[in-house]
Image (cartoon, rainbow, N blue to C red):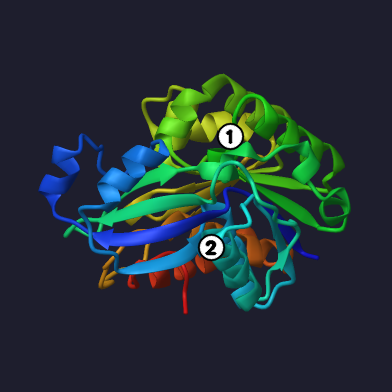
Amino acid sequence: MKILGIGNAIVDVICKVDESFIKQNSLTKSTMKLVNEDEFKKLLSNLNIEETISGGSVANSIVSLSQLGNKVGFIGKVSDDELGKKYEDGLKRENVDYFYSKKKELIPTGTCLILITPDSERTMVTFLGTAGKINEKDIDINAVKQSELLFLEGYLWDEGEPRKAFDKAIKSSNKVAMSLSDLFCVERHKNNFLELVKNNLDITFANEQEIMSLISAKKIEEVIEFSKKLKKLVVITRGDKGALAIENDNVIECEARKNLKIVDLTGAGDLFAGGFLHGLINRKSIKESLEKGTEMSSKIIQNIGARLN
């Protein structure tokens, strides 16, 4: 197997809203907020659902890798309920090996409300459900050992059981990549994420905001200097400024695609990571991998949702 992803097994519920809905519900546009089940249901009761899809950040990357012809797998915790079945079926339809045996849990399968405003930005409200309760027993060590690369999700990292699950997976892996996931996520776990980036990860994916927050940088040049000293691979997306990768002393850049008809930015980072990793595991150069990531993210932002059909 080429790549095994471990991440939040979340069912995405996509809704279009106007700017006032974001303000009225005290949400911060373009970020992800964690809520309990009651808060989630209350928000959803005022909305029309456009689409329901199996989601989760790393799962989206893994599906894109499968669509590009790679043999991939995923581990993510769901309950044996309606959404859990929908989640598993969604992965199987995309030829992703699902290394998780679902059973009836006390907490239901996780759900993410993706609110798309008229400017195509997406704001996420997540009820993690059982997804955030992943523990070391949920990790299939044989699947980890048999994959060339392990891809982890920053969203999933948390003190306690999820951390133990991460540690167990990292110890048995051949190579490890992780996405920092979200600015609030970085700010919550800054010291632990910094330790992971420095000591455990071979590849770090981040957007400009996230990586600058991680090292308390004021400008991108500080990030480049930090990354050069790491002697690892750091891949940074910069919106309309394109993307860059820093490996040892090399800084490789890739321009953003122009003249795109953007309808929804959901999944841009996920599919960028999928495209980049596709290039990397198929022995392409860093530049070619950046270009593949850019191509994939350009495609997804011209669609609704985080999965290409």
Checking the image for residue 102, the label placed there is none
Give 308 or 293, whichever is nearer the viewer: 308
Q: Which residue is mark 2?
A: 82
249 to 140, vertically: above or below: above
* Residue drawn at (26%, 68%) of the image: 263
Residue 20 place in picture, x, y as percent: 10, 46
Going by the numbered disc 1, the residue's amino acid type is Ser
Q: Which residue is mark 1?
A: 227
Residue 3, image quadrant: bottom right
Question: Please, what secondary structure does the residue beneath circle 1 have?
Answer: helix
Q: Residue furthest left?
A: 20
Coordinates of residue 25 in the picture (x, y in percent)? 20, 38
Q: How many labels were placed on the picture?
A: 2
Amino acid type assigned to the residue bearing label 2 in the image: Glu
Residue 189, position in %: x, y? Answer: 53, 25
Q: Residue at x 53, y 63 (%)?
A: 82
For the residues labelled 2 and 1, the Cα–Cα distance comes to 44 Å
Q: Residue at x 54, y 48 (%)?
A: 108
Labels 2 and 1 touching (C-beta < 8 A)? no
Q: Is residue 234 above or below residue 303?
A: above
Q: Position of residue 301 (x, y in %)?
A: 35, 66
In the image, residue 28 sits, relative to residue 250, either above or below, namely above
Q: Earlier in the sequence, mark 2 or mark 1?
A: 2
* 196 relative position to 41: left or right: right
- Report if residue 255 is visible in the image: no
Looking at the image, which is closer to me, 249 or 243? Answer: 243
- Determine crowd level at label 2: few under 14, some 14-19, many 20+ residues with C-alpha closer than 10 A: few
* Residue 70 picture quarter: bottom right
Placement of 255 over or under 8, stated as above or below: below
Q: Could you classify mark 1 by the number of other residues whose Cα lies within 10 Å: few (under 14), some (14-19), or many (20 or more)?
A: many
